[in-house]
Amino acid sequence: MPLVDTAFTLNALQGMHWNFNVPANATDVRVEGTFTASGGARNDVEVYLLNDDEFVNWQNNHTVSTLYNSGRMTQGTVNAALPPGAGTYHLVFNNKFSLLSPKAVRASIRLHYTL
């Protein structure tokens, strides 16, 4: 199931997210895909995978515990296992660290699971 398969722009000091649900009887849950970023001095972006609680903390600029954290990267591969069973998660693209530079991002990331 595709979570994001598009190009988009993150302005300076901005993050963007896609939320998704995993069904109760899901097993072998994985989020996989690739992303690239360009713009600014370092052509970088951060990608996180967060549960609902950690997403609220991220929105309020608190320290978070991530299920996946790319660090600042120009391009990367997401390959993250999630716990089995129901849950709501958030795939976050973060440019809040950049004071001036927008970033052009291209991402193709999918959710996989077995029922």
Image: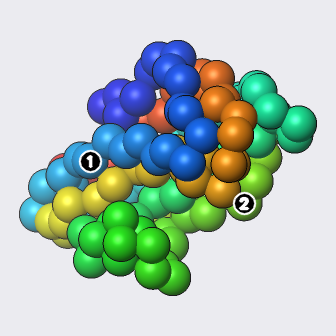
Asked whether, in this view, residue 7 is left or right of residue 45, the answer is left
User: Label 1, label 2: how many angstroms apart (C-alpha)?
Assistant: 20 Å
Vertical placement of residue 103 versus 78, above or below: above
Residue that sits furthest to the top in the current view: 7
Q: Badge 2 is on which residue? A: 71
Tell me where residue 47 appears, x and y as whole percent: 58, 51
Vertical placement of residue 53 versus 9, above or below: below
If you read the primary sequence from the N terminus, does the residue marked by circle 1 or circle 2 appear first?
1
Residue 19 disc label: 1
Foreground residue among 64 and 40: 40
**Residue at the location (29% across, 59% down)?**
89
Foreground residue among 66 and 94: 94
Q: Quadrant of residue 3?
A: top left
Foreground residue among 64 and 13: 13
**Residue at the location (61% across, 63% down)?**
69
Tell me where residue 106 appears, x and y as whole percent: 60, 22
Q: 10 Å neighbourhood of mark 1: few (<14), some, or many (≥20)?
A: some
Tell me where residue 70 appears, x and y as whole percent: 68, 57
Q: Is residue 77 visible?
A: no
